[in-house]
Image (cartoon, rainbow, N blue to C red):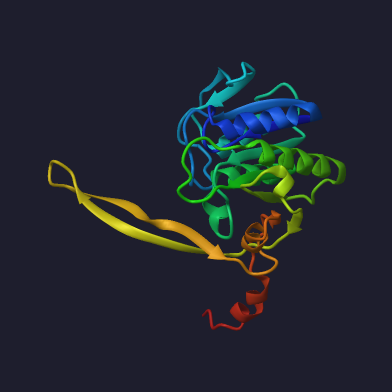
């Protein structure tokens, strides 16, 4: 079993190291991650410039690879033949914040796993539900153990083609995690604000700011599972067609 590990936080992110260490007992692990932070980058594939791939070292001294490309590039390159050995499974993470509801369209962590699904491989995205305002180091060990368990099950059972799973882990000790819920995407509530400022030359510039988003913890959703202390596993598919709307659109006058 050859597992590709990547993330969107960069090659030196502690969540990446914790994930790689947890997965190594399962088979051969290759780490290929961006050389900088690509958080909230969405599904990016670099086509307008050459990509560089360089050797790197993780904090535990193990070998890795890094690239100036996006998280999706970190998956696309191996699937296109960068590595000598075929990849069997892609695991992305561990993201320091949860990826819930509509976050999956923004998240580089999730879209790296989507790139695996596009390539016909099972993909797992792993995120940690750290509380807003958390200061200091994070304990990734519980999320890494959950990731290992999910990877074992996915390797055993497989995933349907063009699907992936998004795993969100409560920020609490492993023994305090109540179990696993299979969930649907919940409703993320964003509170974005446009911040206008002026540079020293008098030119305007803008930040997208605002308060940290939250969500509606309905039963059966990713938000609801985390609120109750459960791991949320949400199956995602690449086919985003709104089938229920197709007949309505056929009834519109198009001429």
Quadrant of the rendered image containing residue 105: bottom right
Side of 207 where 150 appears, left or right: right
Q: Position of residue 206 (x, y in %)?
A: 28, 51
Q: Position of residue 207 (x, y in %)?
A: 31, 51
Residue drawn 61% across the image and 64% down it: 186
Q: Nearer the viewer, residue 69 or 152?
A: 152
Q: Nearer the viewer, residue 81 or 236?
A: 236
Q: Position of residue 178 (x, y in %)?
A: 74, 54
Side of 100 where 123 appears, left or right: right
Q: Is residue 81 visible?
A: no
Q: Is residue 41 above or below residue 3?
A: below
Residue drawn 56% across the image and 82% down it: 252
Q: Is residue 40 visible?
A: yes
Q: Where does the N terminus fall, quadrant-wise?
A: top right
Side of 65 where 210 appears, left or right: left
Q: Is residue 166 above or below residue 23?
A: below
Quadrant of the rendered image containing residue 233: bottom right
């Amino acid at each position: 079993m050859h597992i590709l590990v990547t993330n969107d936080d960069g090659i030196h992110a502690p969540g990446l190291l914790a994930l790689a260490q947890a997965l190594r007992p399962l088979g051969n692990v290759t780490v290929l991650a961006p050389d900088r932070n690509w958080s909230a980058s969405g599904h990016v594939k670099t086509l307008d410039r050459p990509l560089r791939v360089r050797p790197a070292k993780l904090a535990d001294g193990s070998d890795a690879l890094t690239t100036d490309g996006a998280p999706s590039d970190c998956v696309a390159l191996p699937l296109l033949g960068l590595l000598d050995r075929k990849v069997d499974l892609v695991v992305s993470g561990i993201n320091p914040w949860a990826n819930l509801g509509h976050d999956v369209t923004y998240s580089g962590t999730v879209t790296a796993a989507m790139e695996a699904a596009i390539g016909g491989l099972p993909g797992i995205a792993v995120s940690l539900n750290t509380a807003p305002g958390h200061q200091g180091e994070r304990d990734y060990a519980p999320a890494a153990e959950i990731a290992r368990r999910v990877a074992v099950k996915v390797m055993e059972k497989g995933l349907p083609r063009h699907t992936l799973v998004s795993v969100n882990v409560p920020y609490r000790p492993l023994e305090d995690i109540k179990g696993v819920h299979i969930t649907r995407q919940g409703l993320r509530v964003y509170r974005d604000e446009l911040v206008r400022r002026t540079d020293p030359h008098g030119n305007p510039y803008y930040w997208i700011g605002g308060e940290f988003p939250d969500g509606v913890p309905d039963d059966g959703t990713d938000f609801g599972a985390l609120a109750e202390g459960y791991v949320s596993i949400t199956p995602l598919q690449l086919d985003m067609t709104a089938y229920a709307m197709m007949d309505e659109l056929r009834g519109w006058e198009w001429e």
